[in-house]
Image (tube, rainbow, N blue to C red):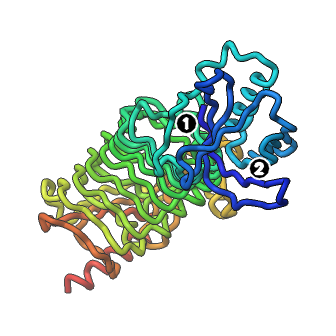
Amino acid sequence: MKLHCKIEIYDRTLSLHRKSQRSILAYVKDSVNDDLCFYLWTRQNKQGTKYKITNNIRKIFKKFITNGKATISLIEPCHDLIIQSDAIQLKSFLNIMKHIIDGLCKSLDKYISKSNITFKSSEFYSLQKVVVKKKSEYPILQGFPRTTEQLVLSGLDRKSFDRQILTLRNLKFLDLSNNKISFLPKELGTLPYLQTLDLSHNNLGKSIRSKWTWLEQTALRRNLYFLDISNNLLTDLPVQIGRLKGLKELKIRHNMLTQLPQNIGTMNNLKLLDVAKNNLLFLPGTIQHLRLYFLDISENLFSKINYNIAFNERNLDKGLPSLVEFSARTLLKSRITYDASLIPYTLVQYLDEAKYCFSCKSACFDHYSRILTHFFPLTFSVNMKNTLNQHFNYEYYFCSTTCHNLMSFSNRNINT
């Protein structure tokens, strides 16, 4: 067993502290007398320092082991090894040491390293960043250090999400790209500091709608600022995407999307949107409310449909709203943060599927009018990438005759 850690050495004879260093501890069998000992390696000392265990452990201090801290006090030399590491791995390491001290060594062979083991400098990795490049290097048994902030598990051909990732409460950057993952657990959205999530080149398009609940969790909605779900066989973009109010960059390129959800126009912090290489027929009109600095719409199907102005109206005479619509409007008016733990999930779905009036920006539910047109009344200043110079249309929704007429009036003024 190898324990990646930070170690500060206190020399009791000289009352001297040596600066904490990134280190590796491992159990080794002495080639001379077959005694079990443990070695300490650092970047500066790749040959390692050997410490006897039997009759040489003065005391082990484990008061703060739940915080990943412990001290091994040795008799010879007069050193105290002050260890800081992942709590679970540190507990396992000290349990093995207790078995050695108690003489219970028969079942410990799998934890004992070779006597001539050496390490490269790259193996003294930062506990904050873990990169697994090969399947054979995947830490199935020992897990990831709980202090991990950046985790890269790209190109490992994994078909399922590893739930031990959910224990990494300090995680800020997660790269699961180039795998075959089709499902992500709800708990992924509860990681309190997750900011960057790369899920490109997976199979998320095979997930049914209910499997996107990880997008609904409060922590993810507030903190996530980068999301890449490109190359995922997506035919529909989940409406929950519009609830990621902190998102700044969204990449959805190379899927099979025919349209984008209307609530994408409510993502006020979005700066980069990449929807290239899809099957989009039009863009939501509300996208013009965003303050994008880059929009890539290249290689879509815009030119396959030649709309001039097409109306597809529904009844705008509202009458009495349904109880569901009344509840939804009351909730929106209160401006509270909601999820399925506070309100019925059917109401969450109803709110997520709302259209948004282009004129007044209010939600449209059971009554609205819809227009498809190339005309856009707002000044939409954005660096737009459109490699084929395709003509494209916007899809507009309006909540009332008044808002609808504002569009028609603006259109007439432009044409004259």
Which image quadrant for residue 31? Answer: top right
Between 95 and 402, the one nearer to me in the picture: 95
| Residue drawn at point x = 84 percent, y = 54 percent | 13
Kind of residue at disc 2: Ile
| Residue drawn at point x = 87 percent, y = 43 percent | 63
* Residue count near mark 2 (Cα–Cα under 10 Å), binned few <14, some 14–19, many ≥20: some
- Quarter of the rendering occupied by the C terminus: bottom left
- Point out the residue furthest to the top here: 106
Between 314 and 159, the one nearer to me in the picture: 159
Residue 185: assigned label? 1
| Residue 412 in picture, x, y percent from top left | 25, 80
Look at discs 2 and 1 and give the one toward the viewer: 2
| Residue 390 in picture, x, y percent from top left | 14, 64
Q: Is residue 293 above or below residue 124?
A: below
The reply to whether residue 379 is in sight is yes
| Residue 42 in picture, x, y percent from top left | 58, 50
Q: Is residue 37 above or below residue 264?
A: above
- Quarter of the rendering occupied by the N terminus: top right
Determine whether the residue tagged by mark 2 lies in a helix, strand or loop.
Answer: strand
Whether residue 345 sits left or right of residue 310 in the image: it is right
Kind of residue at disc 1: Pro
Residue 82: assigned label? 2
* Residue count near mark 1 (Cα–Cα under 10 Å), binned few <14, some 14–19, many ≥20: some
Which image quadrant for residue 334? Answer: bottom right
- Circles 2 and 1, Cβ within 8 Å, touching? The answer is no
| Residue drawn at point x = 73 percent, y = 33 percent | 52
Between 276 and 327, the one nearer to me in the picture: 276
Which image quadrant for residue 413? Answer: bottom left
